[in-house]
Image (cartoon, rainbow, N blue to C red):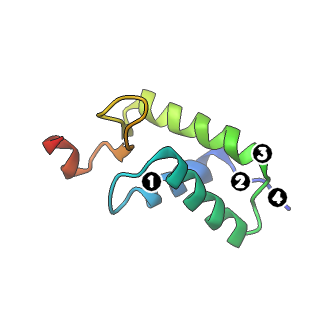
């Protein structure tokens, strides 16, 4: 089984957020299922990578969490976050 790259994780995170914001847990589960379908899921490594990718996305401005650390995560281009 081959591990997914950081770029694949980020692409899947963005894809999961394409329609609306989601919690970190929901994003993680969605990405995990996609990786399992592709034969690239590696268990606990996934949990650490998804946290790192989300943190990097928020720090870079690609992702936003307008309601603080426990709030939903959105794409920075999501029009629904302006009303929050």
Q: Which residue is mark 4?
A: 2
Indicate left or right for 36 with 71 as reference.
Answer: right
Q: Which residue is mark 2?
A: 4
User: What x and y, as percent, mark residue 56?
Assistant: 51, 32
Q: State the residue at coordinates (71%, 66%).
A: 36
Q: Tag on residue 14? A: 1
Q: Which residue is mark 3?
A: 44
Is mark 2 in CB contact (under 8 Å) with mark 4? yes
First in residue order: circle 1 vs circle 4: 4
Label 3 vs label 4, nearer the camera: 3
Q: Residues within 10 Å of mark 1 (few under 14, many from 20)?
A: some
Indicate left or right for 34 with 15 as reference.
Answer: right
Q: What distance separates the C-alpha of mark 3 from that of mark 2?
A: 13 Å
Q: Residues within 10 Å of mark 2 (few under 14, many from 20)?
A: some
Please state which of residues 8 and 28 is positioned toward the viewer in this rendering.
28
Q: Which element carries disc 1, helix, strand or loop?
A: helix
Q: State the residue at coordinates (19%, 51%).
A: 79
Looking at the image, residue 56 lies above or below residue 43: above
Label 3 vs label 2, nearer the camera: 3
Q: State the residue at coordinates (62%, 66%).
A: 34
């Amino acid at each position: 089984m081959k591990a997914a790259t950081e770029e694949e994780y980020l692409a899947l995170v963005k894809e999961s957020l394409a329609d609306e914001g989601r919690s970190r847990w929901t994003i993680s589960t969605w990405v995990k299922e996609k990786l399992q379908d592709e034969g690239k899921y590696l268990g606990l490594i996934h949990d650490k990578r998804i946290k790192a990718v989300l943190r990097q996305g928020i720090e870079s401005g690609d992702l936003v969490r307008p309601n603080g650390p426990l709030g939903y995560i959105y794409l920075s281009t999501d029009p629904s976050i302006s009303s929050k």
